[in-house]
Image (spheres, rainbow, N blue to C red):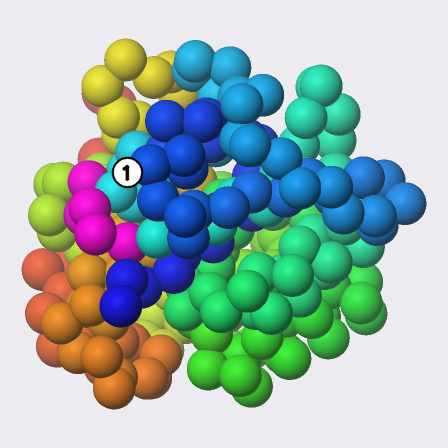
């Protein structure tokens, strides 16, 4: 059985959903209502599509769930992300990718994360290396991921044990930008590949695997320009 990886982001595109019955999509409106979609609203270079490509690159056999919380240029809200997490967990997601960050702590978001974690779901969230902390990355039990320029495509780092790890921040070919959101996507793909091989493994087992196999330990120290 394929490992289900949920992407809470913008739409990921029809080509990544329609070829497998288990690849389904939903859109959360501002009022929390859910509408099933065919994933056909994604722009060719959308952020969600880039995240999906990076996950599939590491775990091509996984089944994608698309929880669309960004669309039509609109920002999202904590209650919408919380509802998306609940929906993804109910759909049987083993890994939930959150390449996003909210600046305010909200009880409903925190409770949705804790509930998913208690069900054995691995939450992977991006955490910018600079600036204010973001949610849900800093909640207990969430695997926070920085972009780490020391890491190549297949590498990862342990920045702070049991909390913060790093991965390559570069976008997939043909996509703009870069940073922690793409590093988180690579980490989610790595987790899906791990769970595909180790079917009975837990989120804790994956974290232990990251610690044992990290190429780098500690924070990267960029040399100041002279």
Q: Which residues are magenta?
A: 57-62
User: Magenta segment, principal secondary structure?
Assistant: loop
What secondary structure is marked by label 1?
Answer: helix
Eyeballing the image, is 93 above or below 173?
A: below
Q: Is residue 177 left or right of residue 34?
A: left
Residue in front for this viewpoint, 190 or 28? 28
| Residue behind mark 1 | 54
**27 sits left or right of 148 in the view:** right
- Along the line of sight, the residue nearer the viewer: 208 or 200: 200
Q: Residue at x 29, y 45 (%)?
A: 55
Residue that extends furthest to the right in the rendered view of this protein:
31
Position in image of residue 83 (x %, y %): 73, 58
Q: Within 10 angstroms of label 1, few (less than 14), some, or many (20 or more) residues?
A: many
Where in the figure is residue 201, as x and y percent of width and height?
A: 26, 84
Residue displayed at 55% across by 65% down: 91
Q: Nearer the viewer, residue 95 or 176?
A: 95
In the rendered view, tell whether residue 206 sits above or below residue 76. Answer: below
In the rendered image, the quadrant that contains the C terminus is top left
Expressed as whole percent of the image width and height from the top left, the position of residue 145 reads 39, 55
Q: Looking at the image, can residue 51 be seen?
A: no
Which residue lies at the image location 14% right of the left edge and 59% below the top edge? Answer: 216
- Number of labels in the image equals 1
The residue nearer to you, when weighing 165 against 33, is: 33
| Coordinates of residue 199 in the picture (x, y in percent) | 22, 79
Q: Which quarter of the figure has residue 54? A: top left
């Amino acid at each position: 059985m394929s490992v289900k990886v949920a992407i809470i982001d913008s739409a990921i595109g029809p080509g990544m959903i329609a070829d497998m019955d288990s690849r389904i999509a939903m859109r959360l409106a501002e009022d929390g209502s859910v509408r099933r979609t065919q994933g056909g609203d994604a722009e060719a270079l959308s952020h969600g599509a880039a995240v999906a490509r990076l996950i599939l690159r590491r775990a091509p056999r996984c089944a994608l769930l698309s929880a669309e919380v960004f669309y039509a240029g609109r920002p999202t809200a904590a209650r919408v992300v919380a509802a998306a997490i609940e929906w993804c967990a109910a759909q049987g997601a083993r890994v939930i990718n959150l390449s996003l960050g909210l600046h305010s702590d909200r009880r409903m978001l925190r409770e949705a994360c804790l509930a998913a974690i208690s069900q054995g779901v691995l939450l992977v969230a991006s955490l910018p290396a600079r600036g204010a902390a973001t949610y849900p990355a800093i909640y207990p039990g969430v695997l926070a991921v920085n972009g780490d320029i020391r890491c190549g495509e297949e590498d990862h780092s342990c920045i702070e044990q049991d909390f913060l790890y790093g991965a390559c921040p570069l976008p997939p070919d043909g996509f703009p930008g870069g940073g922690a959101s793409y590093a988180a996507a690579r980490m989610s793909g790595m987790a899906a590949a791990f769970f595909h091989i180790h079917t009975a493994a837990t989120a804790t087992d994956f974290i232990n695997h990251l610690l044992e196999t990290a190429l780098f330990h500690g924070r990267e120290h960029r040399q100041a320009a002279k």
